[in-house]
Amino acid sequence: MKTLLIIYHSITGGSKAMAHAVAEGAATETATRTLLLHASETTADHVLQADGYVFITPETLGSMAGLMKDFFDCTYYAVLDQINGRPYTALVCAGSDGQGAVKQIQRIATGWRLSEMATPEIVCTQAQTPEAILAPKTINPENLQRCRDLGAAFASGLAMGLF
Ligand SMILES: Cc1cc2nc3c(=O)[nH]c(=O)nc-3n(C[C@H](O)[C@H](O)[C@H](O)COP(=O)(O)O)c2cc1C
């Protein structure tokens, strides 16, 4: 059975809600195992044992969030050249931009020789003042449904051997 590994970090809950929605969608494909892990608990072994990846992070200061970067820093060389060609996609929860985080993840995925199974998605929460940025985030139903659909499509594609 193939495994879809969903790795996320979140500060105010937006990326976490997106990650859970992706996992919910993926779980509808019972022929694929879904593993949802916070970045801080994801090891190189988890990465090696999975068949596809969804990376989900907030954008902070124009970058992916620090704990997500730490996950890549801690696993990058331990899995290099052992996961070539496996599929991935990235989801970024941003206040208003998100492009910086997407580009960083794409560069790392290129280094890992991963294959992008879908264009990365950015969900903007419109948080631009300090108060709005620090407030808990609610992701709107349409975006959560897109996350569910992505999870279902990814898990089905893995089960069918499309990727
Ligand atoms: C320290 C900090 C820096 C941020 N910098 C950016 C940024 O560069 N670009 C952007 O679009 N949003 C930025 N944001 C806003 C977050 O991306 C936004 O609040 C997002 O919804 C957070 O996702 P989360 O709820 O999963 O933590 C920043 C937030 C914080 C706390």
Image: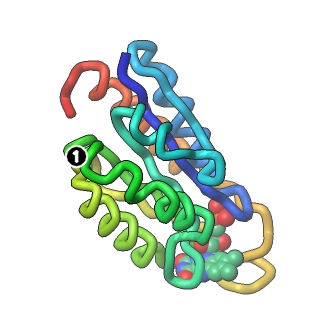
Colour scheme of the rendered structure? rainbow
Instruction: Using the image, determine if residue 21 lies above or below residue 9.
Output: above
Instruction: Using the image, determine if residue 119 lies above or below residue 29.
Output: below
* Residue 69 picture location, percent across and down: 52, 67
Q: Quadrant of the N terminus?
A: top left
Q: Which residue sits at x=33%, y=47%?
A: 88
Ligand 1 quarter of the rendering: bottom right
Q: Is residue 52 rendered to the left or right of residue 18?
A: left
Question: What amino acid type is highlighted by mark number 1?
Answer: Asn
* Residue 19 picture location, percent across and down: 57, 45
* Residue 44 picture location, percent across and down: 48, 45
Q: Which residue sits at x=50%, y=82%?
A: 62
Q: Is residue 91 rendered to the left or right of residue 36?
A: left
Q: Which residue sits at x=51%, y=55%?
A: 56
Who is closer to the viewer here, 109 or 17?
A: 109
Q: Quadrant of the C terminus?
A: top left
Mark 1 highlights which residue? Answer: 84
Residue 153 in sight in this render: yes
Q: Residue furthest front?
A: 78
Mark 1, other Cα within 10 Å: few <14 / some 14–19 / many ≥20:
some
Helix, strand or loop at label 1? It is loop
Tell whether circle 1 marks a residue whose Cβ is less than 8 angstroms from ligand 1.
no
